[in-house]
Image (cartoon, rainbow, N blue to C red):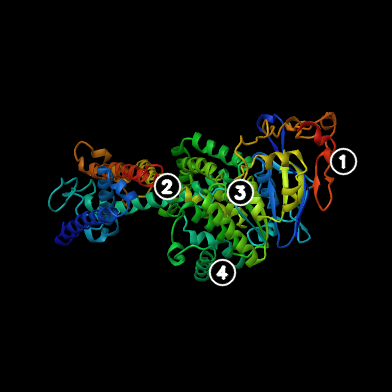
Amino acid sequence: MTFASWLALVIAIVVAAEAVRWLRHRALAHEHWRRFFRHPTAAWGCGILTFLVIIAIAAPLVAPLDPVVQPDPVRLQNHPPSLTFLMGTDVFSRDVWSRFAYGARISLGIGALGAFIAVALGSLVGAVAGYYRRWVDGMLMRLVDIGLALPRIFILLMAVALWDRLPFAWLAFVIGLTSWFGTSRLVRAEVLGLREREFVVAARALGARSSRVIFGHVLPNAAAPIIVSAALSVGNVLLLEASLSFLGIGVAPPRPSWGNMIADGALSLYTAPWTTLFAGLAISLVVMSLNAVADGLRDALDPREESS
Amino acid sequence: MLRVRDLKTYFVTEHGRGTARAVDEVSFDLYPGETLGIVGESGCGKTVTSLSILRLVPEPPGHILPGSVIEFEGRNLLAIAPRELRSIRGNQIAMIFQEPMTSLNPVFTVGDQIAEAAIIHQRLSRGAARARAIEMLKLVGIPDPEQRVDDYPHQLSGGMRQRVMIAMALVCHPKVLIADEPTTALDVTIQAQILELLDRLQKELGMAVLLITHDLGVVAGHTDRVVVMYAGRVVETASTTELFERPTHPYTEGLLAAVPRVNAPRSRLHAIPGQVPAATAWPVGCRFHPRCPYAWDKCVAQEPPLLDAGDGHTARCWLVIEPERRQGTR
């Protein structure tokens, strides 16, 4: 660790903490967001996520070394954590902390992109099925049933195996394409209720076309469950990416992702646990934080829960 | 202006237990500039009639039978393409709904919602749309329109929301306004204000209004002609004064007798016995006969057509041709 990267790390922690403090302060003005921060875990989750996102964005600043460079494969192999190597080195003598920071970029990036695709597609399918009902609904929901019945990792294995080396964005895309089924069911249920509301008839009476009614009137009213499901999806996609990378078909080495960092360190788990520990911890933390944030959002966005 | 002929809107009930004939051969005309009232109890088909005009009846389970005609400016609204229909909805024919609480979208500001029809039909820019919304709020008598335009529906009272609904309906200066029980959900003083507002706007904008209500008091003060509906049928049409002076159908008679009066000696309010039968099983013969004080065997055997009682007054009752029978019972 160089002085500059230590400094950047400290700044990242301070910025994350301050960001949460500022959000919390702003939240006091709105009863909804006050409800969000009533969960202590939601505030923590928020802080951890902010910190990791900052690390991901500022990876070149916080990482002292290139994540793929091997400084000394003989003497620095599996070096334990120290002041120079914050998280130690792995079996190829690469700096685990640098790989962790750059890995955050890829893992969180795939998580966000994949979840975005999943939620967008799920909302679209759910809204169309719920709004049009009848055979449209029947067909789309049977498709969803099939999607939910097949083991997802198996579909992914097949899809990914078709390409030799999948570019990063495509990986996110493929994961997103197999992750929307749950969201679409949720949105459909919500839309089924909303479509019977009078303001939907009122919008049609104004001459709005179906697409305007669906996207302009129905979906915005389903925003709360969609946002919550988006938060949960990020965690799911992240876990999927990790599993795929662990199996060796996700992010192609030597580029680091938290998943393939675990895969790389798995062989020396007993002799050099730090090679897997930090990436594993990060994945768990992100998923837990997202769940906590989703819980908080659920409470904050639920119109039925009145202010207290 | 608006010509409805033989409108039949049926609903298929669940589990195939039968067809609910909610609106059955309803015909009436709406002339430019007039206010036509449609009255009847709940379940008579008033709302379904109004929804049918703009083809807003949910399908399934509802469907409008072929042979029905809803003619607006020479075009049959039941036969035109969806695209053409959309250009009429909200633009030429607009609608106000019963519940101002649920008919506004909770997640948008009232300004956005008022401007929506103008954006759809006239492709106004955001700025122009906002200015129009403020202008409309002013027109419907909402104080501080510049502030209110950014309010959400839950920040307004019921009366205010109904004014917003009216503003929404009138943005494009429609030629016909369908008001489906616009005051039912409001308290009496607000009701009066909203009805006066509708009267004023009708004169200012020169529209024809179809006012649907179950309240004869509303009919008396605010309509030119009245259509009385019972059990999915038109049972009587007349000008408003004629109807109140000379109610012909026993159902209309009963409705009028049921209105509490300020100047009459106190007595028990009159009530029509029984209730509207289920739309899946209308009585044979005259649909009102089980509740009619004058009914005789002819009423059970055969349903009367709309019979002319003179001066554009028609009633679906055999009493029109056998008036002497009216004396008998009451």
Discs 2 and 3 share one subunit: no
Residue B231 higher or lower than A63, as above or below: above
The amino acid pointed to by label 1 is Ile
What residue is pinned by disc 1?
Answer: B321
Q: Earlier in the sequence, mark 4 or mark 3?
A: 4
Q: Residue at x 26, y 53 (%)?
A: A24
- Residue B325, image x, y percentages: 83, 35
Real-space Cα distance between discs 4 and 3?
30 Å
Q: Residue at x 63, y 65 (%)?
A: B173
Q: Secondary structure at mark 4?
A: loop
Q: Nearer the viewer, residue B178 or B115?
A: B178
Q: Which mark is residue B15?
A: none
Q: Nearer the viewer, mark 4 or mark 1?
A: 1
Q: Which mark is residue A224?
A: 2
Q: Nearer the viewer, residue A44 or B313?
A: B313
- Residue A54, image x, y percentages: 27, 56
What residue is pinned by disc 3?
Answer: B181
Real-space Cα distance between discs 3 and 1?
34 Å
